[in-house]
Image (cartoon, grey):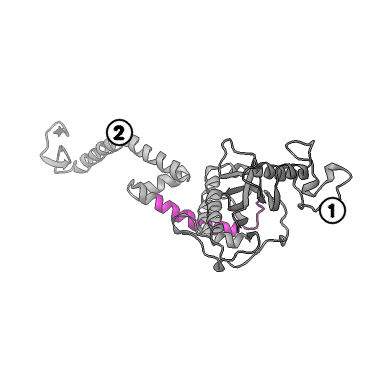
C-alpha cells in the first residue's frame, strides 16, 4: 500500500496497479495524482532489471541477425519484445530492401569477394561471390552466403542426368546460380537479397563450376588460397582450383598438391608433349606439364606426374575478380530445368 498525501490531507480515491494501491483525491488534484502515478510506473518499467532484460534481447537479436542496433530495437518495440517476430520482420524488411538495393546498385563494380570449393572423390563445386569492398568480404554473413552457394552447387553436382566422357562439367552463370535452391526453401537469389539488404552494398553470385566423375578410377580434388588452417572438403579464399585426374590407389595421392600448383602458377592448358614445346624462359611457360613444379622447382610437372603415375583429365582455376572469357572451352552449359537438384 502506498499512501500519497495531497495538500496535507489524506484522499479517498483509490487506483489499483497490480500489487500497489494508491490513494488520491477525486476532485481537482486528480490529474496531478495520475501524473505522479505514471511517473512511478515509468520508474519501475525503466528499472535496472527491465533494462537489463531488454538490453539482453537487443544484443541477442543484433548478434543473430547482424542488422543495425537501431533496426533491431525498432523491431523489438514493434513486436512487444517478441524476438522471433522481430527477427521475421527484420528479414522481410531486409529482403524487400535487398531487392530494391540490388536493382539500384547493380551498376556498381563488384570485384572483391571470395571463391570457394566443396568436393569429394567424385564431385566438386567451385563458386565465386563478389562484393564491392574487401571489408564486406571479411564479414561473417558474406562467408555464410558463399558457403550456402557452394553447398547448393555441390548438391547440384550430384544430380547430373547425362554422363558424357570421363567427367560431366557444367558452368553456371549468375542467373542460374540464383535459381538454385538454398536453405529454408529459398532460392540463392533470395538469400543474396537478404545479404544485400543487411550490408547495403552490391553483391553478385558471379559464376560456378559443377563437376561429376563418371567412373570410379577418376578422382576430383580442389584447393583454395590462402589455405585453411584445418584441412576440409570446404574452403574459401581469393583463388581456387578444381582438378580431375587418374592415379592408382597404391600411390601417394597428390591431387591437392597439383591444385596448389595450378592456383600458384596459373597454367593456360595441360599441354601435349607430342605437339607443344617448352617455352625458352621457364617463367613464361603456360603449359602445365612443362612448368617447374611449384612445390619443388627442381622438377617439372611432367616429371612429377610420371613419378606418381598421374594422368590429368582436366582442371579449372578461378581468380577472384578476374576477367571472364565469354565461353569457357570444354564446359557444358544448359538450362537448369534439365537437371534434377537435391532439396
Residue indicated by mark 2 = 49
Q: Secondary structure at mark 1?
A: loop
Q: Which of the pair 18/339 is nearer the observer?
A: 339
**Residue 133: in sight, yes or no?**
no
Q: Which of the pair 11/169 is nearer the observer?
A: 169
Outermost right residue:
280
Kindly identify the residue that appears in the image at 41 percent across and 39 percent down: 59
Q: Which mark is residue 235?
A: none
Left or right side of 227 for 324: right
The range drawn in magenta is 87-110
Kindly identify the residue that appears in the image at 25 percent across and 40 percent down: 38
Quarter of the picture holding the N terminus: top left
Q: Quadrant of residue 137?
A: top right
Label 2 to label 1: alpha-carbon separation: 77 Å
Left or right side of 104 for 40: left
**Residue 317: in sight, yes or no?**
yes
Q: Main secondary structure of the magenta part?
A: helix
Q: Secondary structure at mark 2?
A: helix
Q: Residues within 10 Å of mark 1 (few under 14, many from 20)?
A: few
| Residue 5 locus on image (x, y percent) | 16, 32
Outermost front residue:
250
Q: Which of the pair 304/7 is nearer the observer?
A: 304
- Please say whether residue 285 is one of the residues in the magenta stretch: no
Nearer-N-terminus badge (2/1): 2
Q: Quadrant of residue 233?
A: top right
Kindly identify the residue that appears in the image at 48 percent across and 44 percent down: 66
Residue indicated by mark 1 = 276
Left or right side of 99 for 31: left
Kindly identify the residue that appears in the image at 60 percent across and 64 percent down: 163
Q: Which of the pair 247/162 is nearer the observer?
A: 247
Amino acid at each position: 500500500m502506498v499512501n500519497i498525501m495531497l495538500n496535507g490531507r489524506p484522499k479517498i480515491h483509490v487506483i489499483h496497479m497490480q500489487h500497489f494501491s494508491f490513494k488520491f483525491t477525486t476532485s481537482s488534484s486528480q490529474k496531478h495524482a495520475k501524473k505522479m502515478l505514471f511517473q512511478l510506473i515509468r520508474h519501475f518499467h525503466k528499472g535496472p532489471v527491465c533494462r537489463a532484460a531488454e538490453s539482453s534481447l537487443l544484443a541477442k537479436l543484433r548478434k543473430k541477425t547482424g542488422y543495425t542496433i537501431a533496426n533491431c530495437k525498432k523491431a523489438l518495440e514493434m513486436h512487444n519484445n517478441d524476438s522471433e517476430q522481430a527477427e521475421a520482420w527484420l528479414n522481410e524488411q531486409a529482403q524487400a530492401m535487398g531487392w530494391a538495393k540490388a536493382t539500384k546498385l547493380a551498376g556498381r563494380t563488384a570485384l572483391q569477394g571470395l571463391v570457394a570449393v566443396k568436393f569429394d572423390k567424385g564431385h566438386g563445386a567451385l563458386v565465386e561471390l563478389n562484393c564491392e569492398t574487401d571489408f564486406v568480404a571479411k564479414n561473417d554473413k558474406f562467408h555464410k552466403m558463399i558457403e550456402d552457394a557452394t553447398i547448393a552447387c555441390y548438391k547440384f553436382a550430384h544430380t547430373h542426368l547425362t554422363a558424357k566422357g570421363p567427367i560431366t562439367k557444367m558452368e553456371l552463370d549468375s542467373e542460374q546460380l540464383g535459381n538454385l535452391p538454398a536453405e529454408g526453401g529459398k532460392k540463392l537469389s533470395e538469400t543474396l537479397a537478404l545479404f544485400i539488404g543487411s550490408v547495403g552494398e552490391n553483391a553478385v553470385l558471379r559464376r560456378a563450376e559443377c563437376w561429376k566423375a563418371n567412373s570410379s578410377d577418376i578422382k576430383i580434388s580442389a584447393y583454395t588460397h590462402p589455405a585453411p588452417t584445418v584441412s576440409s572438403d570446404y574452403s574459401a579464399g581469393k583463388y581456387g582450383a578444381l582438378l580431375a585426374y587418374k592415379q592408382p590407389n597404391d600411390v601417394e595421392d597428390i591431387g591437392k598438391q597439383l591444385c596448389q600448383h595450378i592456383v600458384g602458377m596459373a597454367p593456360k592448358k595441360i599441354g601435349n608433349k607430342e605437339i607443344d614445346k617448352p617455352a625458352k624462359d621457364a617463367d613464361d611457360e603456360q603449359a602445365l606439364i612443362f612448368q617447374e613444379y611449384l612445390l619443388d622447382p627442381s622438377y617439372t610437372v611432367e616429371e612429377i606426374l610420371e613419378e606418381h603415375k598421374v594422368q590429368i583429365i582436366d582442371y579449372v582455376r578461378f581468380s577472384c575478380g578476374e576477367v571472364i572469357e565469354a565461353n569457357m572451352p570444354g564446359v557444358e552449359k544448359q538450362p537448369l530445368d534439365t537437371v534434377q537438384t537435391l532439396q
